[in-house]
Amino acid sequence: MHYVVEYNRCVGDSIWRTQRALERCGYEVERVPQLTTLHIYRPKKIAFKQFASDLISRLQRTNGSFLLASSSGKCWTCNSGGNRPGKLVRVF
């Protein structure tokens, strides 16, 4: 399944390091023209729960966030601050 993730404050403020870290986890990742956005292919052998955990691990602990959209039309957001830190919340 294909996903697009837009990071705000990833670890080290480096989308390139985040891309390499996700590739080491077994995902096919490519940067798109928007500098903080990645296109990710998740193989079927990797569960969504593990995928979400891998994405969350790339956030800065105090103020990082991302918006995740899937090719099926579902969207999620995650914020490392606020009242649900580190939780993936379905938007629609």
Image (tube, grey):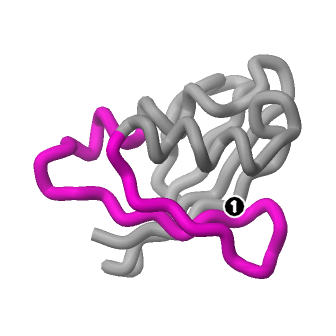
Instruction: Decide which of 3, 75 is in the foreground and name it.
Output: 3
Q: Is residue 29 left or right of residue 44?
A: right
Q: Is residue 64 above or below residue 26?
A: above
Percent coordinates x, y for residue 25 in the rendering? 39, 36
Which residues make up the magenta segment? 26-52
Q: Amino acid at mark 1?
A: Glu
Q: Is residue 70 left or right of residue 86?
A: left
Tag 1 residue = 6
Mark 1 Cα within 10 Å, few/some/many (few <14, many 20+)? some
Q: Is residue 76 above or below residue 10?
A: below
* Residue at the (71%, 40%) spot, across then down: 17
Magenta span contains residue 45: yes
* Residue at the (32%, 79%) spot, across then down: 72
Instruction: Decide which of 66, 45 is in the foreground and name it.
Output: 45
Q: Is residue 79 left or right of residue 30?
A: right
Place residue 46 in its image quadrant: top left
Q: Is residue 23 above or below residue 81?
A: below
Instruction: Decide which of 18, 68 is in the foreground and name it.
Output: 18
Toward the top, the furthest residue is 61
The answer to whether residue 92 is seen in the rendering is no
